[in-house]
Amino acid sequence: MDILARIQAASITAPCLAPQHHHKHLQQLCFPMSTGHHFSCFYMHQNHFPVAMPGHPCRIPSGSIRCQSGAVEAPEMQDVKFSKSMLSFDMGKDRLSKVPASQIRNFSIIAHIDHGKSTLADKLLQVTGTVSDREMKEQFLDNMDLERERGITIKLQAARMRYVAKDGEPYCLNLIDTPGHVDFSYEVSRSLAACEGALLVVDASQGVEAQTLANVYLALENNLEIIPVLNKIDLPGADPERVRNEIEEIVGLDCSEAIFCSAKEGIGIQEILESIVAKVPPPKDTSMNPLRALIFDSYYDPYRGVIVYFRVVDGSIKIHDKIQFMASGKEYEVDELGVLSPGQMQVNELFAGEVGYLAASIRSVADARVGDTITSSANKAGMALSGYQEAVPMVFCGLFPVDADQFGELREALEKLQLNDAALKYEPESSSAMGFGFRCGFLGLLHMEIVQERLEREYGLNLITTAPSVVYRVQCADNTVVECSNPCELPEPGKRVWIEEPFVNIEMITPKEYIGTLMELAQERRGEFKEMKYITESRASVIYILPLAEMVGDFFDQLKSRSKGYASMEYSLSGYRKSDLVRLDILINGEPMDPLAAIVHKDKAFAVGRALTQKLKELIPRQMFKIPIQVTIGTRVIASESISAMRKDVLAKCYGGDISRKKKLLKKQAEGKKRMKSVGRVEVPQDAFMAVLRLEKEVV
């Protein structure tokens, strides 16, 4: 059946009611025309709903279509695809209208990495009409290029949706999409604190993974209502019944009403929305109390200052209100107020239970920190909200600008980035070889890579990072305990009694055929076996206690490589233990290279030292004098290489004659080389630094 016949069969004739002056807002849709039919043309209004032209009867697609005078009822029509998308988008336009607190649902999506969180969020936005088909793209909420390139979610994102449930009532759904990688668990904990419910998304083919468990425990700590969703049921290898049993056995959730869905194909989306409405509890209606709002995210806009994302817990907030940040005590006037849907849409007022953003010409990034409480200057709240637990950095490294003139720009960039990434910590640091920079703390190795890449892309900086290290505790001879994250700050051997390093509990969930190779990997990294249990007949959980320093290198890459990508891991800090650790110093031409220093276990010191000296010999260009490269522990040299000098052939002009003449020329050359070596300085090129630092990340 052609498009003309399909529209004829499932449409009605509507009188034209659009005024003549609206013609400039209309765009003609091209359909086959035919004389003798009851219509001649069909137009689309700029706000995406159909409008008939004056003087022409018009066939309008099915559903409740808004014309200039109101709604026109039409029979169902399934075949013409554009009518459904237009109707859902038309319904989504009303998402700014106020609803009572009993009809607000705040929920988050939690899952292991690559289990389909972002795809499900895209489909929810599309089905509720929040985003039109024309604007829709994959990973819609992931607005950083870095997120799209790597295919992962790095930042939590909020979106407000409007959904009319089967009971006929409109509901306001506030969605917060969260990252799935273990390094960004702090983002997950912040988003869960702003919600009353969570969708637990599990891949129906892969089953329960390590980060699935970690996120469930975070949600349970926040007393959230958890709705299990089994995603990707359209895959050939999907086994939703097995995965449902896994969730019940491992997590302990009742999955009798778990929803089977495929976000990609749009299966089960309606059931998810109805389940959110039915099961997620609404926020408490405390609009009459003094204003208290919790800041869960923020970023710096060069034109509007600090933009604050918040959840109103008590009271209400209006545009032009005078507000106060309770931690910093600073007061501002609200210039702009709105909701995230998913772009910023301005409103005049927000009430208890709603999620939104504000701009108040905040110039100082320190005035509005994540976890702070917003209250009204006129009617202050008696007590601030509890906020968030402070993020504890696990991995440290030095960040230095390649161009020393960029130090000020690096400081400003870190201040602005810390506003958007509350888990980032930094303090100034100086090095004889690298100049001025910052010692930065991160939640993990991926977090470190992402921060470095964001600084380079978003702020135009060219950076060098030193090898990652962890925080060591050193008991000194004078009974003081020193915390040391930089190898250069480690006290001399004669001044310290012992060194403690952090250990982590690491849980690896793997198919049973890879148990042996993963246990071998953990043993190589000084791991201590703790427990192994079979989750199902084919999958096991292996738990080790491992030094954190052994894990911050390429442990995760090795885990994925040895298990062909099937294994996953989750870790948590278990405490500090005494270890036999030493500091490796690298001397080039007798000068110590502080950025290349490393703290390693005594058993690995010789192998690491040999690898570093050989790599430096390859990378440092030859000079006019001999360059010794040494790796030392204290004053003892454990590995050494030398780069031979470039040499002029001073005997080229001697065709013969007495040997004493040749000896005299060679002696004179040797004296010159000796004098040059005493005053010469070896410049280690930046690419050599980077190569050695990469090598340290692999072998340390």
Image (spheres, helix red, strand yellow):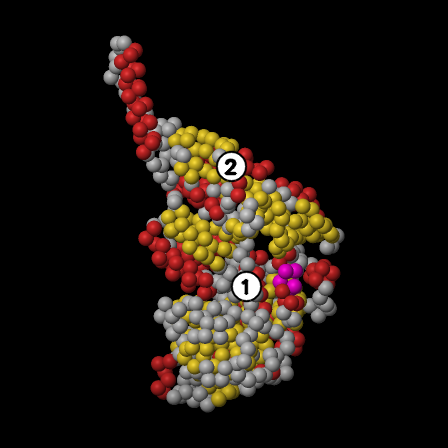
* Residues packed near mark 1 inside 10 Å, few (<14), some (14 to 19) or many (20 plus): few
Viewer-proximal residue, 648 or 22? 648
Identify the residue at image location x=60%, y=79%.
283
Q: Which residue is farthest left?
A: 653
Q: Which of marks 1 and 2 is nearer the N terminus?
A: 1
Question: How many marks do you count on the picture?
Answer: 2
SS at badge 2: strand
Could you tell me residue 604's position as x and y percent? 57, 38
Magenta span includes 422: no
**Left or right: residue 628 compared with residue 636:** left
Q: Which disc is residue 415 wearing?
A: none
Name the residue type under label 2: Ile
Local SS, label 1: loop
Judge whether residue 678 can be spotted in this image.
yes
For label 1, the residue is 390
In front of the other: label 1 or label 2? 2
Residue extent of the magenta highlight: 212-217
SS majority, magenta: helix
Name the residue carrying label 2: 633
Residue 562 spot, x, y in % from top left: 61, 44
